[in-house]
Amino acid sequence: MGLSDGLLNPNKKAMVVDDCCNMIDKQLASKSGISGMALKTAFAALKGIKPGYIPEVVEQLLPECFTALDPLWSEGVEKGDPVEHLVSSRSEAADALLGITDARIKLSKRAIVRGTYEKLRSSAKKHVEEAVPDLALVIDKYVKE
């Protein structure tokens, strides 16, 4: 059973999505400086597309994200600490996650979404790597339930 199977079952899915959205908000709140302002502005624009847009996108992306992270998580389980393994493999995890969003953005029909992503993509890996420890904790929380 992969991460998607276990984490997105009907009894957990809404909670996982909610925790991931809270994690995103926490990550955004921690950003400062010009790049932090740019990220916060970008997410405000995306949230303005329609109510619930960010949770909807998170829900759509999670199955692919969990599938992409499953090999790293499984390696961590074999080594005895999947959270630590994912954190120590944050560069590889970020590449896997960004591969999904890069492919998805090409299919987006919303100019604001494509434009925002393209403007922020060059700094995205750093931000995704910074979020991996929190994401690992979210995954761990629901894998244990």
Image (spheres, rainbow, N blue to C red):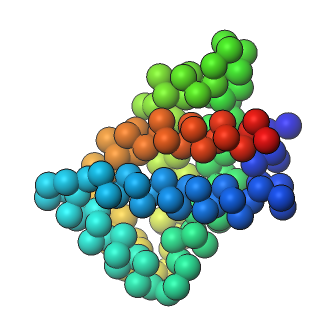
Residue drawn where x is 19% and y is 54% of the image: 32
- Of residues 117 and 18, which is closer to you in this image? 18
Q: Position of residue 92 (x, y in %)?
A: 49, 31
Side of 64 relative to 85 (left or right): right
Whether residue 48 is situated above or below residue 97 in the rendered picture: below
Q: Position of residue 30 (x, y in %)?
A: 30, 51
Task: Kindly indicate the quadrant of the structure image that contains residue 112.
Answer: bottom left
Residue drawn where x is 60% and y is 44% of the image: 138
Side of 33 relative to 43 (left or right): left
Whether residue 33 is situated above or below residue 77 in the rendered picture: below
Side of 108 relative to 118 (left or right): right
The number of discs equals: 0
Extreme left residue here?
34
Whether residue 66 is situated above or below residue 8 in the rendered picture: above
Q: Where is the N terminus found, in terms of image quarters?
A: top right
Residue drawn where x is 34% and y is 75% of the image: 44
Any part of residue 27 in sight: yes
Q: Position of residue 139 (x, y in %)?
A: 64, 41
Q: Where is the C terminus found, in terms of image quarters?
A: top right
